[in-house]
Image: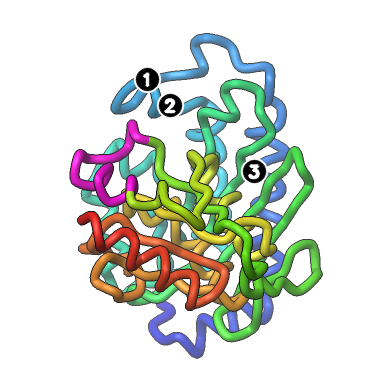
C-alpha cells in the first residue's frame, strides 16, 4: 500500500510515461474506433438529453481502471461512469489511498456529434491534492501533462499562460445554462459586461488547456465534479495560472466549493473574474 506523497513522487518519476501509454491505448482501442461511427444503441442519456454516455466512455474507463490500478498497487479509481453507477465510490477522493480521477471522454456531446473537441482526462491525487495530470485530445493529437511543482507541458513543450494582453476584452468560457441553477445564472450574467467577452464552454479539459496555452483568459464553471476539473486545474496552476471560488479560496477537488468558481491564466485575472461573480451572487 502506498501511503505517502514521497512514494507517489517516486512512482511518477518512473511511471508517468506508462500512464501516458495507457491513456493512448485506451483512446486507440475504445474511443477512436467509435468516433463518427457510433451506432444508435451505443449512446444513452444519463440525467437528460444534454448528459450523454457512450460505449466509448464506459469501455475506455474500464480499460483505464484496470491499467492504472495495476500500475500503482494500493490506489483506487474514481471514474465518471463508475460514480454514475454507484455514487458512493466518489467518497474515495476524500480517503487516504492514492486516487486516479478519470473522465474517459470529456466532451461526450462533441464526441457524439462527430466534433473533435473532446479529450481523455486523468489525474492522480492524494488526500485532496492533485499531484499529476494527463490531458489527451486524440483526434487533435495533443497530449498535455503536469506534475505538481514541475511545470505543465504540451507535447513536450513547456506551457506558460502569462497575463492577458492589456486593453483586450477577457475571453471567458462559461458554463452552459443547462448546467446552472437560477442563483448561478445570476452570478454568471455579471460577466456580460464591458471588458469581458464570455462564451459557452466546450470540453472542460480543453478549456483548461486553452488557458494554460494563453489562448483563453479564464473559465467560470458552476459544477464541481472532480473528473472534469482535477487534471485541468493542475495544468493551469503549473502554467502559472490560478483558481478561486466565490469565497476567494482555491477550488477543492474534495467538494464543498462556493460556486461558480473561476480558473484563469494569472492570479490578477482570477481575482477580477471572481469579483464580478461575487457582485451578482
User: What x and y, as percent, mark residue 178?
Assistant: 33, 31
**Where is mark 3, residue-wise?**
26
Closer to the N terminus: mark 3 or mark 2? Answer: 3
Q: Which quadrant of the view contains residue 175?
A: top left
Measured in 3D between alpha carbons, the distance from the residue under mark 3 to the one under mark 2, in whole angstroms, is 19 Å
Q: Which quadrant of the view contains residue 98?
A: bottom left
Was residue 155 drawn as part of the magenta stretch in this picture? no
Tell me: 95 left or right of 192.
left
Q: Which portion, as a residue range, is magenta?
A: 177-189
Tell me: 170 left or right of 275.
right
- The local secondary structure at tag 1 comes to loop
Q: Nearer the viewer, residue 56 or 1?
A: 56
Note whether 226 is above or below 164 in the view shown: above
**Where is mark 1, residue-wise?**
49
User: What x and y, as percent, mark residue 119?
Assistant: 61, 44
For the point 52% across and 70% down, the residue is: 234
Label 3 vs label 1, nearer the camera: 1
Q: Which quadrant of the view contains residue 251?
A: bottom left
Amino acid at each position: 500500500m502506498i501511503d505517502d506523497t514521497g512514494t507517489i513522487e517516486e512512482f511518477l518519476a518512473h511511471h508517468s510515461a506508462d500512464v501516458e501509454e495507457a491513456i493512448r491505448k485506451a483512446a486507440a482501442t475504445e474511443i477512436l474506433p467509435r468516433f463518427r461511427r457510433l451506432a444508435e444503441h451505443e449512446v444513452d442519456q444519463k440525467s437528460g438529453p444534454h448528459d450523454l454516455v457512450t460505449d466509448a466512455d464506459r469501455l475506455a474507463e474500464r480499460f483505464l481502471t484496470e491499467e492504472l490500478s495495476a500500475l500503482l498497487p494500493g490506489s483506487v479509481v474514481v471514474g465518471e461512469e463508475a460514480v454514475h453507477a454507484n455514487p458512493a465510490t466518489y467518497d474515495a477522493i476524500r480517503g487516504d489511498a492514492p486516487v486516479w480521477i478519470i473522465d474517459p471522454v470529456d466532451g461526450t456531446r462533441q464526441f457524439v456529434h462527430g466534433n473533435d473537441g473532446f479529450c481523455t482526462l486523468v489525474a492522480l491525487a492524494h488526500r485532496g491534492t492533485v499531484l499529476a495530470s494527463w490531458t489527451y485530445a486524440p483526434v487533435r493529437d495533443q497530449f498535455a501533462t503536469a506534475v505538481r511543482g514541475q511545470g505543465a507541458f504540451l507535447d513536450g513543450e513547456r506551457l506558460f499562460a502569462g497575463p492577458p494582453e492589456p486593453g483586450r476584452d477577457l475571453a471567458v468560457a462559461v458554463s452552459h445554462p443547462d448546467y446552472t441553477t437560477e442563483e448561478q445564472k445570476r452570478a454568471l450574467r455579471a460577466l456580460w459586461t464591458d471588458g469581458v467577452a464570455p462564451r459557452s464552454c466546450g470540453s472542460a479539459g480543453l478549456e483548461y488547456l486553452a488557458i494554460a496555452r494563453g489562448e483563453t483568459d479564464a473559465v467560470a464553471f458552476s459544477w464541481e465534479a472532480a473528473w472534469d476539473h482535477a487534471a485541468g486545474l493542475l495544468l493551469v496552476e503549473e502554467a502559472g495560472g490560478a483558481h478561486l471560488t466565490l469565497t476567494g479560496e482555491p477550488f477543492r477537488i474534495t467538494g464543498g466549493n462556493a460556486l461558480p468558481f473561476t480558473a484563469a491564466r494569472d492570479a490578477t485575472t482570477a481575482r477580477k473574474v471572481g469579483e464580478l461573480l461575487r457582485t451578482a451572487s
